[in-house]
Image (cartoon, rainbow, N blue to C red):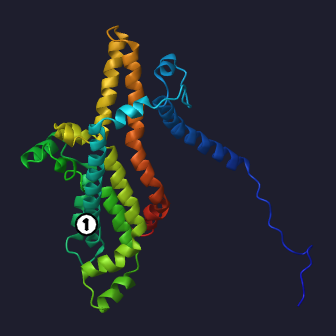
Amino acid sequence: MTTVPASVQMHKPKSKWTPGQIILVAIIFVFVLTCVLPFLNVIAISFSSKSAILRGDVSFWPVEFETKAYDIIFSDKTMIDCLFYTIKLTIIYTALAMVLTILMAYPLTKKRLKGRKFFNLLALFTMYFSGGTIPIYLNVRDFGMLDTMWSLIIPGLLSTYNMIIMKSFFSSLPNELEEAATIDGANDFQILLQVYLPLSLASIATLTLFYAVGKWNSFADAKYYIQTKALQPLQLRLYNIIKGSTAVDVTAIEGNANSNAQNVSESIESATIIFATLPILVVYPFVQRYFVSGVTIGAVKG
């Protein structure tokens, strides 16, 4: 057995940063700071004292650290109830939305489906044209869903964009898998449940997060359909707090309110933003790794 002299052994070339890579990293770093710094400022304000906020000393680090704003939020039973109600609302909406998305995407991949092109066109039509806010409101009213949780679930239950992503992923799977399952005697539902869905976990996780984040952050529909306070989601509660804070700001400028009231509302507003954002941020890391594969893998075949 002969040994290769050390002088002959190939060495890995040292990676050197090119000017283009340095510029790209610098641009990405600026974008990261643009996203992170405002969030750090909100966190800092939520943990800072009233006097520090009033002096304008708070930037990206708490000044005169205190947790009074969070004490107020967590001592408010209605806020905690609102959090759990929003979690329940998001889970129900996301589960039903994923079921509808899968059940619509799967048949549209089958060439044997009669009228497949028509149904595809019908789905695409809804991406560009809508009945408008008033007709949708009238539909919700006529179906008796006003001031109920279902008014926040059913009207926006299916996203055409998400359905197309799921359909593209199903289309990219080899036809031989379906043919083999059919030979074994499986029907369409068995093929979907036992063949397609286990291979689609990346897309399912990604679209689940899309639906969940969209519902968690929405409040416009609740503004239109919900009057009962107990049925208002967390984001609408946050919107009302911010709107109330703005009203206090205007009153203070006009000289009819003291600055302490303005300051307290700003601190509570920041703490509520963190309170409303943290749950979805906790979920995100668990499905973040599915993003690239889940969204792009279906783009191989249309």
Q: Is residue 219 above or below residue 12?
A: above
Question: Which quadrant of the figure has residue 61?
Answer: top right
Name the one closer to the observer, 67 or 60.
67
Q: Is residue 159 visible?
A: no
Mark 1 crowd level (few <14, some 14–19, many ≥20, 10 Å Cα): many
Across and down, in percent, residue 138 comes to 11, 43
* 73 sits to left or right of 38: left
Q: Name the residue under label 1.
A: 104
Question: Which quadrant of the figure has residue 196?
Answer: bottom left
Q: Is residue 140 above or below residue 263?
A: below
Question: Which quadrant of the figure has residue 166?
Answer: bottom left
Q: Is residue 294 above or below residue 22?
A: below
Across and down, in percent, residue 130 comes to 22, 47
Q: Residue at the location (27% across, 90% down)? A: 185
Q: Residue at the location (44% across, 64% down)? A: 294
Q: Residue at the location (48% across, 24% down)? A: 49
Q: Residue at the location (43% across, 66% down)? A: 202
